[in-house]
Image (cartoon, rainbow, N blue to C red):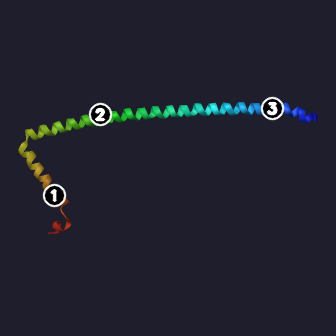
């Protein structure tokens, strides 16, 4: 019986240590979840900023290209018209039905 009494305080201490360990692990998991969530949010914000920069750059380059094309059309209207007619003809031939291309 003395061995049973001798183990009881040890068993109680072990149970107490296990409960403290469980609480510590739960706290660590909570901190990890918070850290992962914050890291994911920061990464999402960085991607958003980078995407906005890309869109802004592409938009600006597109505007510059359209201005250049408009300037070229104004500078050479006859050539622009001939190019447009040629592209329209080639596009029409490519999009025509196969039976019309065989004739």
Q: Which residue is mark 3?
A: 12
Decide: is 70 above or below 97.
above
In terms of image quadrants, where is residue 21?
top right
Q: Please count the marks in the image.
A: 3
Q: Residues within 10 Å of mark 3 (few under 14, many from 20)?
A: few
Q: Which residue is mark 2?
A: 56
Between the residue at mark 2 and the residue at mark 3, the CA separation in whole angstroms equals: 66 Å
Q: Is residue 18 left or right of residue 35?
A: right
Which is more toward the observer, 33 or 56? Answer: 33
Q: Is residue 11 left or right of residue 63?
A: right
The mark that comes first in sequence, 2 or 3, is 3
Tell me the residue at 12%/37% (across/down): 71
User: Circle 2 — which element?
Assistant: helix
Q: Residues within 10 Å of mark 2 (few under 14, many from 20)?
A: few
Q: Which residue is mark 1?
A: 92
Tell me the residue at 16%/37% (across/down): 68
């Amino acid at each position: 019986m003395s061995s049973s009494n001798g183990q009881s305080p040890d068993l109680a201490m072990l149970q107490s240590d296990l409960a403290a360990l469980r609480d510590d692990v739960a706290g660590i998991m909570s901190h990890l979840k918070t850290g992962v969530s914050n890291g994911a949010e920061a990464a999402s914000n960085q991607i958003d900023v980078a995407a906005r920069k890309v869109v802004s750059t592409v938009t600006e380059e597109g505007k510059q290209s359209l201005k250049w094309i408009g300037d070229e059309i104004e500078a050479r209207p006859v050539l622009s018209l001939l190019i447009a007619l040629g592209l329209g003809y080639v596009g029409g031939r490519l999009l025509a039905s196969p039976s019309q291309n065989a004739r």
